[in-house]
Image (spheres, helix red, strand yellow):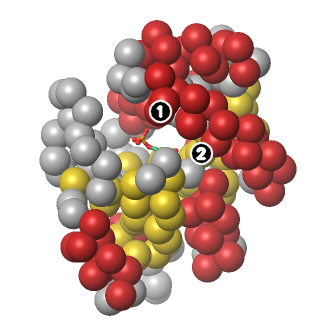
Amino acid sequence: MEKQKGKLFVISGSSGVGKGTLLKLLLQNNPHINLSISVTTRHPRRGEIDGVNYFFTTEEDFLNSVENNEFLEWAEFNGNFYGTKQAYVEKTLAKGEDLILEIETRGALQIKQKLADAILIFILPPSIEELEKRLRGRNTEDETAIRNRLKEAFREIECSKDYDYRIVNDNLEKALEELQSIISYK
Ligand code: ADP
Ligand code: 5GP
């Protein structure tokens, strides 16, 4: 009998909304779920490790991979390229394992077109003011990057209407519960 394929979850949400925080907790509670590691041309932030947070690469290598059709999806975000390797996604799902991609909206919508079974989840902030507060509180971006990320936030929230689920990350525990119930749904 053919092995049942794993499920693909795509999680998006504006920078600073709490995706990383939620995913860390979700993966602690669900160690069987895989988190895809993206390729990016962005420079590592303090504490980020190559091969753990991202595969950090040059623009030249990234564009070579685009030419060679190695990406299931890719997008430019805030002046940097980000992409998901197709081979890794195919291999993981074929093994019957579930997989989460944490990617921005343009990439997520490319995935939905290619893989109609993918489950798209968008994390919303309780308000734009709270989003700005969290982004500043994280202390990882300079003023220009914060401004750009807030501008992107409006565009991304607009795209969230095409997602299967939307979760407001106001109370962290409640948002985690909602995410857990979507992931566990058979
Ligand atoms: P993202 O991965 O979406 O960019 P992070 O997970 O880095 O966001 O979260 C940004 C900041 O917001 C972090 O300092 C985090 O501790 C905080 N945060 C996350 N979720 C909540 C929440 N529900 N309430 C208050 N602060 C939160
Ligand atoms: P950051 O620079 O804050 O790590 O990520 C910026 C944005 O890029 C986030 O919205 C994140 O979800 C998105 N992102 C990360 N990896 C990928 C990827 O492989 N593809 C796409 N399309 N977006 C990604």
x and y percentages locating residue 62 in the rendered image = 29, 71
x and y percentages locating residue 15 in the rendered image = 54, 33
Relative horizontal placement of residue 138, taking residue 65 as reference (left or right): right
Secondary element at image label 1: helix
Image point 46% across, 85% down: which residue? 1
Image point 57% across, 29% down: which residue? 147
Characterize the local packing of mark 2: few (<14), some (14-19) or many (20 or more) Cα atoms within 10 angstroms.
Answer: many
Image point 61% across, 79% down: which residue? 114
Q: Earlier in the sequence, mark 2 or mark 1?
A: 2
x and y percentages locating residue 36 in the rendered image = 36, 55
Characterize the local packing of mark 1: few (<14), some (14-19) or many (20 or more) Cα atoms within 10 angstroms.
Answer: few
x and y percentages locating residue 43 in the rendered image = 25, 44
- Mark 2 beta carbon near ligand 2 (under 8 Å): yes
Is residue 182 among the parts visible in the rendering?
Answer: no
Image point 40% across, 60% down: which residue? 81
Is residue 171 among the parts visible in the rendering?
Answer: yes
Relative horizontal placement of residue 116, taking residue 4 as reference (left or right): right
Q: Nearer the viewer, residue 23 or 67?
A: 67
Q: Looking at the image, which residue sits at the far bottom? A: 68
Relative horizontal placement of residue 156, taking residue 49 as reference (left or right): right
- Mark 1 beta carbon near ligand 2 (under 8 Å): no
Q: Quadrant of residue 148?
A: top right
Q: Is residue 28 above or below residue 12?
A: above
Label 2 to label 1: alpha-carbon separation: 18 Å
Task: Count the marks.
Answer: 2
Q: Nearer the viewer, residue 111 or 80?
A: 80
Instruction: Tell us which disc is closer to us: 2 or 1.
Output: 1
Relative horizontal placement of residue 116, taking residue 30 as reference (left or right): right
Q: Is residue 159 above or below residue 137?
A: below
Q: Which residue is mark 1?
A: 145
Q: Which residue is mark 2?
A: 12
Secondary element at image label 2: strand
